[in-house]
Image (tube, grey):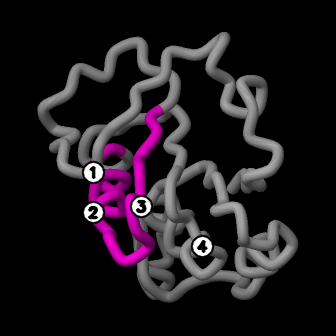
Amino acid sequence: MKLIAANVISTRARGDSDQNILVLDNTVDPRTLALAGVDRIDLHFPKFTDGRAYSQAFLLRRRLGFTGEIRATGDVLVDQVLQMERTGFDAAELRADQNLAHAQAQLQCFDGFYQGDAVTVHPAFSGRNTA
């Protein structure tokens, strides 16, 4: 997962100039969208306690088969990045007061997971670790 510190977010870090980017409010149902030609989808967390963007990311990745980048924006905390990665996010723009090194350490805490997720569909006990 790509982590982006708030102090380095710029037009270049966002990739705004060369990608077809769709910015979604967390009230939008991704199943109603035409995703053809979309390179990146930005999902917004208005507050860290609002988890609707997790559901949007999972729907985009697993049910709709979106293969482009899914990026978390808004009130993104270090504690959220591991769950974001497991639900289908590729990148996260951290809130200004969050430490990039701590977020990277969160992603290295576990070697694997017993349960399946948006990226590794089958649980570890199934013996099928393909997406």
- Nearest to the eye among marks 2 and 3: give it: 2
**Residue 79 x, y percent position in the rendering:** 60, 81
> Would you name the residue on which mark 2 appears?
52
* Disc sitting over residue 77 in the figure: 4
Name the amino acid type tagged 1.
Asn
Mark 4 falls on what kind of element? loop
Give the CA separation, mark 3 to mark 4.
20 Å
Give the CA separation, mark 2 to mark 3.
15 Å
Of mark 3 and mark 1, the one earlier in the sequence is: 1
Give the CA separation, mark 2 to mark 1.
6 Å
Give the CA separation, mark 4 to mark 2.
15 Å
> Would you name the residue on which mark 3 appears?
118
What residue is shown at x 38% (from left), y 47% (from top)?
61
Q: What crowding class fits label 3: few (fewer than 14 Cα within 10 Å), some (14-19), or many (20 or more)?
A: many
Give the CA separation, mark 1 to mark 4.
17 Å
Name the amino acid type tagged 3.
Ala
What residue is shown at x 38% (from left), y 59% (from top)?
46
For the N terminus, give its image quadrant. bottom right
State which quadrant residue 3 falls in.
Answer: bottom right
Mark 1 falls on what kind of element? loop
Please say whether residue 48 is one of the residues in the magenta stretch: yes
Q: What crowding class fits label 2: few (fewer than 14 Cα within 10 Å), some (14-19), or many (20 or more)?
A: some
Of mark 4 and mark 2, the one earlier in the sequence is: 2
Please say whether residue 62 is one of the residues in the magenta stretch: no
What residue is shown at x 49% (from left), y 64% (from top)?
120
Say whether marks 2 and 1 touch (CB < 8 Å). yes
Say whether marks 2 and 3 touch (CB < 8 Å). no
> Would you name the residue on which mark 1 appears?
26
Q: What crowding class fits label 1: few (fewer than 14 Cα within 10 Å), some (14-19), or many (20 or more)?
A: some
